[in-house]
Image (cartoon, rainbow, N blue to C red):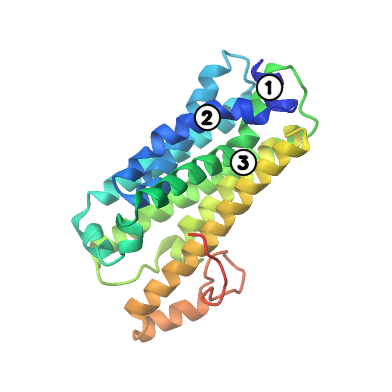
C-alpha cells in the first residue's frame, strides 16, 4: 500500500500523513515566525526521514536507508544547531532589529507560511519517499550509479555545512566584530548555504531514477527549485547585511571582491542585483 499509493498516482493521499507531521513539528513558528523556516524546518526533515524508516518495516534497501539517515542527520544537526544559536545572547541581540524575521505578523500570515512551508518540506522529501516506495514494491533501481553518486553528494554537503558552521562559530568567538574569512570561507563567502545546496542536489539525484510519474517529478522539482532559490536569496541577504556592517573595512572589501559569493571557484562575487524573493 505504501508503495502503490506513492508511485502510482495517489501522491497527495500518501503525502498527507507527512504533511500533517510537518505541520505538527513546524507549528513552533507560532511562537516565533522565523521558527517556521528554521527550527521547524530542520526537525520536520528529520521527522519525515525517521518516520519513513519506521514505516518501511524493514523493506527499505541500503540506499533508501542511507538516504533517510543522511536526511535525518541533516535535519537533527540543523535543528539542534539553530536551537543552540537561539540561546546565544549575542545572536539574539543581533536579530532584535530584524523584526520581519523575528516574530511580527498576524495570524493569517502565520497560517499561510505554516501550511506553505510544510508542503514545501514534503516536496523536498519526495525523492526519498519514491525510493522507499520502490523498495517496498521490489522495483529495481535502473540507475544505481546515479543513486550512489547522489548519496555521496549528500554526504559531502552535510560535511561542508557542518564544518562551515563550526568554523564560523569559532571565528566569531575569537573576534565577535569581525567577518569570517577562514577555513571554508576562503573558498566561498557562504559555505554553509553551498553545503545545503549539495545536500538537496544529492537527494534528488539519489531518487531521480525512481520518481516514476509526472506528479512525483513535479513535486520533487518544485521542492528542489525552492530550496535552491532560498539559498541564493539567503546568500544575497547575508551579503547586504555584511555590506552594511563591514562595507567601510578595506579588508572586507578585498575579501568580498575576490571570494565567490556562493559557489566555490565560480567567479560570481555579488548577488545584490539578483531578484530573489525567497530566503
> Observer-nearest residue: 7 or 128?
7
Q: In this view, does 262 lie above or below 210?
A: below
Q: How far apart are marks 2 and 1 (CA)?
A: 13 Å
Look at mark 1 in the image and give the residue it sits on: 5
Q: Name the residue under label 2.
A: 18
Residue 151: give x, y in percent of width and height.
62, 38
Residue 276 is situated, as x and y percent measured from the top left of the image, at 55, 66
Number of numbered callouts drawn: 3
Nearer the viewer's eye, disc 3 or disc 2? 2
Which residue is denoted by mark 3 in the rendering?
203
* Residue in the picture at 71% in, 43% down: 218
Question: Could you give the CA–CA distance between mark 1 and mark 3, rounded to whole angstroms?
Answer: 21 Å
Q: Is residue 199 above or below residue 59?
A: below
Q: Residue at x 57, y 43 (%)?
A: 154
- Considering the numbered disc 2 on the image, is that residue within a helix, a strand or a loop? helix
Q: Is residue 121 left or right of residue 126?
A: left
Q: Residue at x 44, y 65 (%)?
A: 185
Q: Which of 51 and 277 is in front in this view?
A: 277
Is 158 positioned to the left or the right of 251 in the image?
right
14 to the left or right of 137: left
Amino acid at each position: 500500500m505504501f508503495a502503490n499509493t506513492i508511485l502510482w498516482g495517489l501522491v497527495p493521499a500518501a503525502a498527507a500523513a507527512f504533511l500533517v507531521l510537518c505541520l505538527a513539528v513546524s507549528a513552533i513558528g507560532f511562537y516565533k515566525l522565523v521558527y517556521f523556516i528554521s527550527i521547524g524546518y530542520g526537525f520536520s526533515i528529520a521527522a519525515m526521514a525517521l518516520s519513513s524508516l519506521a514505516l518501511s518495516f524493514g523493506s527499505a534497501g541500503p540506499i533508501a536507508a542511507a538516504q533517510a539517515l543522511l536526511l535525518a542527520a541533516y535535519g537533527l544537526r540543523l535543528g539542534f544547531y539553530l536551537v543552540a544559536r537561539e540561546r546565544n545572547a549575542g545572536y539574539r541581540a543581533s536579530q532584535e532589529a530584524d523584526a520581519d524575521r523575528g516574530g511580527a505578523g498576524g495570524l493569517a500570515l502565520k497560517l499561510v507560511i505554516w501550511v506553505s512551508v510544510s508542503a514545501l518540506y514534503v516536496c523536498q522529501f519526495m525523492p526519498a519517499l519514491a525510493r522507499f516506495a520502490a523498495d517496498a514494491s521490489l522495483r529495481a533501481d535502473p540507475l544505481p550509479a546515479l543513486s550512489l553518486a547522489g548519496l555521496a553528494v549528500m554526504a559531502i554537503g552535510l560535511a561542508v555545512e557542518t564544518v562551515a558552521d563550526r568554523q564560523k562559530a569559532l571565528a566569531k568567538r575569537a573576534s565577535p566584530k569581525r567577518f569570517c574569512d577562514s577555513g571554508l570561507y576562503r573558498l566561498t563567502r557562504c559555505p554553509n548555504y553551498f553545503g545545503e545546496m549539495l545536500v538537496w542536489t544529492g537527494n534528488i539525484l539519489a531518487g531521480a531514477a525512481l520518481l516514476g510519474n509526472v506528479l512525483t517529478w513535479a513535486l520533487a522539482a518544485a521542492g528542489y527549485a525552492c530550496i535552491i532559490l532560498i539559498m541564493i536569496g539567503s546568500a544575497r541577504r547575508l551579503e547586504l547585511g555584511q555590506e552594511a556592517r563591514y562595507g567601510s573595512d578595506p579588508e572586507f572589501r578585498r575579501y568580498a571582491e575576490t571570494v565567490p559569493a556562493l559557489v566555490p571557484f565560480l567567479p560570481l562575487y555579488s548577488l545584490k542585483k539578483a531578484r530573489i524573493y525567497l530566503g
